Amino acid sequence: MRELVERKVDARGVTESAGLERGRGRGRSVTVNLAESPLGWLRARGLVDARQFEAGERLRADYERAALAPSVTMRWTERVDGGGGDTLDPTLTQIAAKARFDAALHGAGRGLGDVLWRMVCAGEGLPDIERTLGWPQRSGRIVLTLALDRLADHYGLA
């Protein structure tokens, strides 16, 4: 299933709706498939609100920046085009992202980090999470929304 929308991405990786902001500031417009992740699928159907979705996306961004997922290819340390000198060293960026990721899971509270990691970072669907953790059917969304609310509180999202 594909649900495509236009988003604006800036140098920090922050995305926003590309509607009226398209011409302003730095960044570029990209097409995003909202059904790409299980969290995006829930958001597209109104099962999680914008605040919860934003919190999950911040967690996933830090997870990706920290390179915690298994590598599939060679890691190139120098950019071919010579760019990138105006930001943190890639190693420092990775360390900072790992610290933010760990702090976010800690801020979500005990017992909620597992469901956050499985849904947001590993991309598992709710039925798989419920089965793996031995939860009753349809209980995963309740726990997930609680975890996302705690995560949004940690990030200070309004």
Image: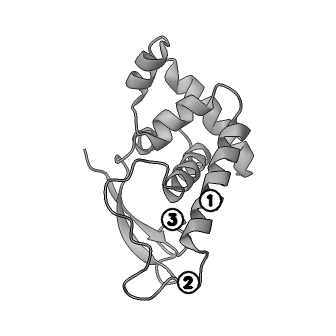
- Residue type indicated by callout 3: Thr
Mark 3: few/some/many CA within 10 Å (<14, 14-19, 20+): some
Q: Is residue 142 left or right of residue 3?
A: right
Residue drawn at x 69%, y 36% is 108
Q: Are marks 1 and 2 in contact (CB under 8 Å)?
A: no
Residue drawn at x 49%, y 49% is 68
- Residue type indicated by callout 2: Gly
Circle 1 or circle 2, nearest the eye: 1
Mark 1: few/some/many CA within 10 Å (<14, 14-19, 20+): some
Quadrant position of the N terminus in the picture:
top left
- Expressed as whole percent of the image width and height from the top left, the position of residue 54 reads 57, 51
- Expressed as whole percent of the image width and height from the top left, the position of residue 50 reads 57, 48
- Which residue is situated farthest in the bottom direction here? 82
Q: Identify the residue position indicated by label 3 in the image.
A: 15
Q: Earlier in the sequence, mark 2 or mark 3?
A: 3
- Residue type indicated by callout 1: Ile
Q: Identify the residue position indicated by label 2 in the image.
A: 25
- Residue closest to the eye, 117 or 82: 82
Circle 1 or circle 3, nearest the eye: 1
* The quarter of the displayed image where residue 44 is located: top left
Q: Identify the residue position indicated by label 1 in the image.
A: 95
Residue drawn at x 49%, y 41% is 120
Q: Is residue 46 visible?
A: no
- Expressed as whole percent of the image width and height from the top left, the position of residue 130 reads 45, 19
Q: Is residue 129 visible?
A: yes
**Label 2's element?**
loop
- Residue closest to the eye, 78 or 99: 78
Mark 1–mark 3 distance (CA, rounded to whole Å): 22 Å
**Label 3's element?**
strand
Q: Earlier in the sequence, mark 1 or mark 3?
A: 3
